[in-house]
């Protein structure tokens, strides 16, 4: 379980491998490629009907990895993904910056700044909840369909609980798969 585990002792060696052994050119090219992968995965929801909606949530992973390589390049990768979505699939442009991308930034920075799993989950779920609420109540874009459209405290609590569960699943996925993804780079 990831909730109360000290993640610094497990993830810092992996983050150090990503950061220390690479030069400027590697970080720049890797961030660009990760942004491209994120844009392709996010646009799958509009390009491939049906199964594309199952693929598009995975656009979070490249942004998280890019932030772990370097926080500066991670934010640049996030911005580049937004610009690539403008060219590839403009209909996904409003969803990515506020939901998938915002959660990826929250998870990435949470893994860097916090040492307990519950802090990372809470931090990243705040990013996702704020992004969903901005889309629903400020932009008036029904990101959750007709569900939870009227503004009320109960709806915000439901959105936050959904965000908490979704971010917990993503944090578990990152915590379990990141060491396996980094192993080929290490060797």
Image (cartoon, grey):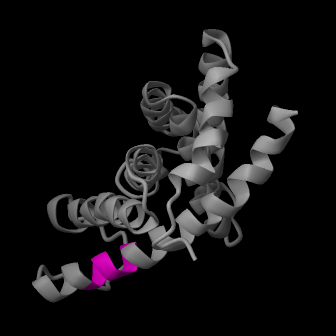
Residue shown at the point (58%, 42%) measured from the top left: 12
* Above or below, 98 relative to 125: above
Q: Position of residue 131 (x, y in %)?
A: 29, 58
Residue shown at the point (88%, 33%) measured from the top left: 187
- The answer to whether 98 appears left or right of 80 in the picture is left
* Above or below, 124 relative to 143: above
> In which quadrant will I find the N terminus?
bottom right
Picture quadrant of residue 115: bottom left
Residue shown at the point (62%, 58%) measured from the top left: 174
Q: Position of residue 33 (x, y in %)?
A: 67, 29
Q: Position of residue 85 (x, y in %)?
A: 51, 40
- Span shown in magenta: 158-163
Task: Answer yes or no: is residue 43 visible.
Answer: no
- The answer to whether 150 appears left or right of 33 in the picture is left
Q: Main secondary structure of the magenta part?
A: helix
Question: From this viewpoint, which residue is outermost toward the left?
Answer: 152
Residue shown at the point (17%, 67%) measured from the top left: 137
Say if the magenta span includes residue 41: no
């Amino acid at each position: 379980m990831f909730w109360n585990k000290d993640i610094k002792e497990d993830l810092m060696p992996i983050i150090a491998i990503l950061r220390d052994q690479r030069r400027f050119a590697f970080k720049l090219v890797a961030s660009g490629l990760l942004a491209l992968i994120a844009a392709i995965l996010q646009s799958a929801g509009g390009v491939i009907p049906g199964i594309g909606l199952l693929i598009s949530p995975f656009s979070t992973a490249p942004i998280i990895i890019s932030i772990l390589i370097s926080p500066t390049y991670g934010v640049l990768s996030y911005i580049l993904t937004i610009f690539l979505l403008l060219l590839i699939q403009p209909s996904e442009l409003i969803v990515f910056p506020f939901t998938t991308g915002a959660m990826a930034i929250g998870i990435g920075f949470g893994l860097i700044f916090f040492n307990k799993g519950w802090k990372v989950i809470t931090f990243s779920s705040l990013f996702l909840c704020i992004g969903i609420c901005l889309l629903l109540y400020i932009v008036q874009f029904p990101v959750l369909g007709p569900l939870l459209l009227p503004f009320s405290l109960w709806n915000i609590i439901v959105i936050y609980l959904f965000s908490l569960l979704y971010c917990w699943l993503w944090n578990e996925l990152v915590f379990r798969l990141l060491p396996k993804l980094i192993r080929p780079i290490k060797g």
